[in-house]
Amino acid sequence: MSENLSLVVHGPGDIKLEKRPIPEPCPGEVLLKIHSVGICGSDVHYWQHGRIGDFIVKKPMVLGHEAAGTVHKLGEGVEHLKVGDRVSIEPGVPRENCEFSKIGRYNLSPTIFFCATPPDDGTLCRYYVHNASYCFKLPECVSYEEGAMIEPLSVGIHACRRGGVHMGQKVLIFGAGTIGLMNLLVAKSMGASPIVVVDMVQERLDMAKCMGASCVCKMEKNTCPREMASKVKTALCGMPDVTIECTGAEQCVQSGIYATKSGGVLVLIGLGNTNTTAPLIAVTTRELDVRGIFRYCNTWPTAINMLASQMVDVKPMITHRFPLDQAIEAFELVKKGTALKVIVQCEEPEKKEDPQANALEQCQQQCQQLLQQCQQQCQQMQKDQKEHCGRIGGGRS
Amino acid sequence: MSQDNQALVLACGELKLEKRPVPELCPGDVLLKMGFVGICNADVHFWSEGKFADMVVKKPLVLGHEAAGTVVKVSCGVNHLKAGDKVTIEPIVPRENDEYVRIGRYNLSPTCFQAGFPPDDGAMCRFYVHKANYCYKLPECVCLEEGALVEPLCVALHACQRGRVKVGQKVFICGAGPIGLLTLLVCKAIGVTLIVVCDMCQERLDKAKCLGATIILKVDKCTCPMELAQKVKNSLCAMPDICLECTSSDTCIQAGVYAVKPGGIVVLVGMGLATANVPVTNATVREVDIRGSYRYTNTWHTAIALMASKKVDVKPLITHRFGLDQAQDGFECVKKGAGIKVLLNCEAQCPSMCPPPCPPPCPPPCPPPCPQPCPPPCPPPCPPQCGQQQSQCGQQRQCPQHSFF
């Protein structure tokens, strides 16, 4: 087997493509040949800063957590998958059946394994081992790339579930990046309407409109939060029941508080400043529920169903593709902020025609043949000599 | 009416007893002879600053929304009350059947009548008219003084409902003022076994301990929120499920977010700070919900039942009583932070007619209070902006032909 090419972060500003050994699956695990991996903002953040909050890169770590691949080898006891199955990976695997796991909120388990969160290695490599229960088989009609998009789609599903989004509700989404757009798709599929998306970048708003936003609103750096709330009210002909905040920007959190209808829900996904100045009096007197989102739980089967039934189409979000050996260029592109979703293709490319190698091989084959011929001739000569000697010295004995 | 109505009117930052006509009854109304009315922190803010949160006193106003009295007269169509009934009033009454009323969240209806909040007159008067559907009969075993505490008890009850407080949970309550202490009593009634209460005032903390707080923590202006959160965790040997924040201070809001377990809830009950510094990242990555709680909806029956069954005993919270003509002293008392709940006795001061106050409860064995005095009160704020002259009340109540409410 060839070596396992992997994209590894060592510290702030330091990522390298390295060859690592191919791991062996333990009982309950599977070895996957990774096919497609999406690059997330958090991967770029670990590259640039070497940390996110209290998660610090202290030893080299493989990046990537939005992945799909093929089952290559089964660990002992794995029965629901077989070699060759195409799967999507749920990167968060609880290590213990703690109080959070027991209530079904395993995303909050403090000891959870999570791909590409220090110190756990991720999936930007050729071969990767994962807990088989957290690998979900993809139906034929769902591609590997869509399989890789299930992770950000899951953020949208978890957020809309926590926000209580349901049919007939008005929804406001701040941010038209991948996460904002996933929330748009999920909210739409849950029957919310109208849905307004807010962003600062016109191209992103155009994309949101293409992907089904009822209306879009452009926000400037100096847009006052109350003014933004008023614009949203006009756009939706009413105040949103649920606001989903995907940017982490203070301006958007404040706008969300003013904009959301009394008794409504403000879902916070985006991570920004540690502390934010918020008009809490409005939260109190209008009984807003402010609900934070951390990753997801129990979303993979739903996401696969949504993709298989074509309830949502995530393919338009994929704007760029790079092979694994050009992963660093891929990261540079994501850092620029101009791409939407960049996918890294991790399968080893087929061997190309190499004239020199071919000539060498041919030469080797010819030599082999010549050697065999020589050996055969030698044996024949020895045989002939024996016979000849036998005839001559036949009467000696 | 043979008796004149006297009302405690707030005008230009001053409280004065004024003679006013006894209000007329419209369909659906009852006329009450007011018994006791509690003085709330909001009332003190209206008096000393002319405003509270985003509500501003723009014209003369009768304060008072924590009230209980006796029915004198009922209008036609009112069948569930009769003259002589003791009742407690729910001060917010929706004016229109808007979307919030229709889903049962009438506390959020923006056009509600709110007794005692500008511009709607309240119950600090001798005779007061209110919608009968928002007057609730008190059982024999609940006196009028207790009836005046039903409203703040409802604030506490609603907050616990918003926080989904359940039996067996661990709760962190910020503030041991009237709302904090009532919240403590409700939590205990629900079956919460571990309750931590924090406050700046040792006397109030001692009261909290008497009323059943498991642990009390003293804080001061310089307390670091993370340190407070750690103290809470250490004292409970666990992270609380819920924080009921009754102070509206930055320190406590932050401590609440840091202290509660992942997936936990912080309920904002306290009102005061327009903006606050919130640790949103911590709240987001630990899925800590922050839920505002505003007044109450559909809590009166439960609150009265809690009092009647003695599951909640509010009498220890009543520390001072003043006649309506000594209201100013009462307001000063609350402003100083003295005692816990100060009541105004609104009945005409005729000894034979004054209802006997509730007998003081037998003091449970409390630890001796700390010899240190409470921290000094804040200096009085600047006088309010109102430049209006005191004027006679010429308000006419709008009487709809038919009242849905």
Image: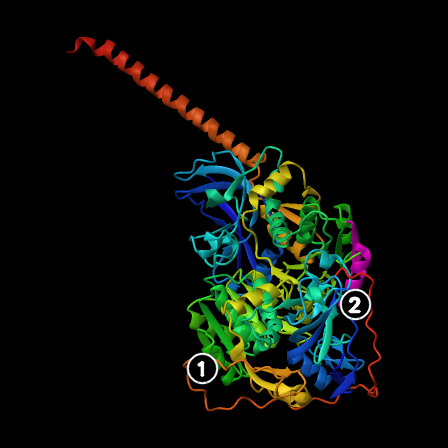
Q: Position of residue A195 (x, y in %)?
A: 75, 51
Mark carried by residue B26? 2
> Could you say whether the residue bearing mark 1 is in a helix, strand or loop?
loop
Q: Picture coordinates of residue A226 (x, y %)?
A: 77, 67
Above or below residue B332? Residue B26 is above
Rendered-image quadrant of the N terminus of chain B: bottom right
Residue at mark 2: chain:
B
Is B50 above or below relative to B187? Answer: below
Instruction: Read off the chain for label 1.
Output: B
Amino acid type assigned to the residue bearing label 1 in the image: Pro
Q: Please name the residue shown 60% across and 77% down the image.
A: B249
Displayed quadrant of residue A202: bottom right
**Residue A323 at least partly seen:** no
Residue B18 painted magenta: no
Q: Where is residue B110 in the image (x, y as percent from the top left)?
A: 75, 65
Residue range of the region highlighted in magenta in the rendering:
A214-237
Foreground: B233 or A297?
B233
**Which is closer to the viewer, label 1 or label 2?**
2
**B147 sits to left or right of B369:** right
Report the Cα–Cα distance between label 1 and label 2: 45 Å
- The residue carrying mark 1 is B363
- Residue B296, labelled with which disc? none
Crowding around mark 2 (Cα neighbors within 10 Å: few <14, some 14 to 19, many 20+) is: many
First reached walking from the N terminus: tag 1 or tag 2? 2
- Residue A220 in the magenta stretch? The answer is yes
**Image x and y of residue B312, in percent:** 51, 70
